[in-house]
Amino acid sequence: MKIAAAVMAAAIVVLGLSACSTESKDDAQNQVNNALTSGQQALESAKGSAGSALESAKQSAGTAIDQGKSALFVATFRGAYAPLAADRDDADIEKILTTTCTEVAKGTDKEAVEKEIITLAENNGTAPTQEQAGHIYELAKAACP
């Protein structure tokens, strides 16, 4: 809207100046056309920038883990692995999820991610078995965007 108003203002100024001067009507028309073309280019550029910003925001939202899935992961982890969840806050358990999702998105090998899960899920000297880490991996992967 601001760009369109600026283009109109520029056209009025050009027309006003041409009426006060001795320039021919063709020169005045060329100036108006140039002003309109510049305004249209600026408008298209602004539209492109806004579109890029919107697309970037959509991509960021697409990579965020859904809060409902995150809460479900935490609740399932607490229920299935009580010794690993004892005395841990939700954010600590969510870190297992976010780390797993990040590694899955990067294409990290499943076994390497499971090793990381064993490290992250360890609690007070109790670590998940390789089989449990595999289950946690699958649980987390299902919650990933």
Image (spheres, rainbow, N blue to C red):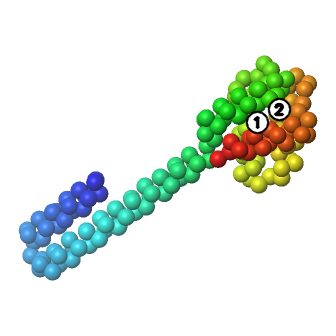
Image location of residue 57, percent across then percent down: 52, 49
Q: Tell me the number on the disc at residue 96.
A: 1
Question: How many other residues sit within 10 Å of disc 1, few (<14), some (14-19) or many (≥20)?
Answer: many
Q: Is residue 61 above or below residue 128?
A: below
User: What residue type is disc 2 on?
Assistant: Ala
Residue 116 appears anywhere in the view? no
Image location of residue 117, percent across then percent down: 83, 38
Q: What residue is drawn where x is 28% and y is 53%?
A: 2
Q: Is residue 19 left or right of residue 62?
A: left
Q: Residue furthest top?
A: 87
Q: Tell me the number on the disc at residue 77.
A: none
The residue carrying mark 2 is: 121
In the picture, which quadrant includes the N terminus?
A: bottom left
Image location of residue 65, percent across then percent down: 63, 41
Task: Report if the CB atoms under discs 1 and 2 are less than 8 Å apart.
Answer: yes
User: What residue type is disc 1 on?
Assistant: Ile
> For numbered disc 1, what is the local secondary structure?
helix
Q: Is residue 25 left or right of residue 89?
A: left
Q: What residue is drawn where x is 80% and y is 29%?
A: 80
Q: What residue is drawn where x is 86% and y is 30%?
A: 122
Image location of residue 134, percent across then percent down: 85, 42
Q: Earlier in the sequence, mark 1 or mark 2?
A: 1
Q: Is residue 89 left or right of residue 43?
A: right
Residue 137 appears anywhere in the view? yes
Q: Is residue 81 above or below residue 15?
A: above
Question: For residue 42, which quarter of the picture?
Answer: bottom left
> For numbered disc 2, what is the local secondary structure?
helix
Foreground residue among 140 and 43: 140
Question: Distance of mark 1 from mark 2, alpha carbons?
Answer: 7 Å
Question: How many other residues sit within 10 Å of disc 2, few (<14), some (14-19) or many (≥20)?
Answer: many
Q: Is residue 65 left or right of residue 76?
A: left
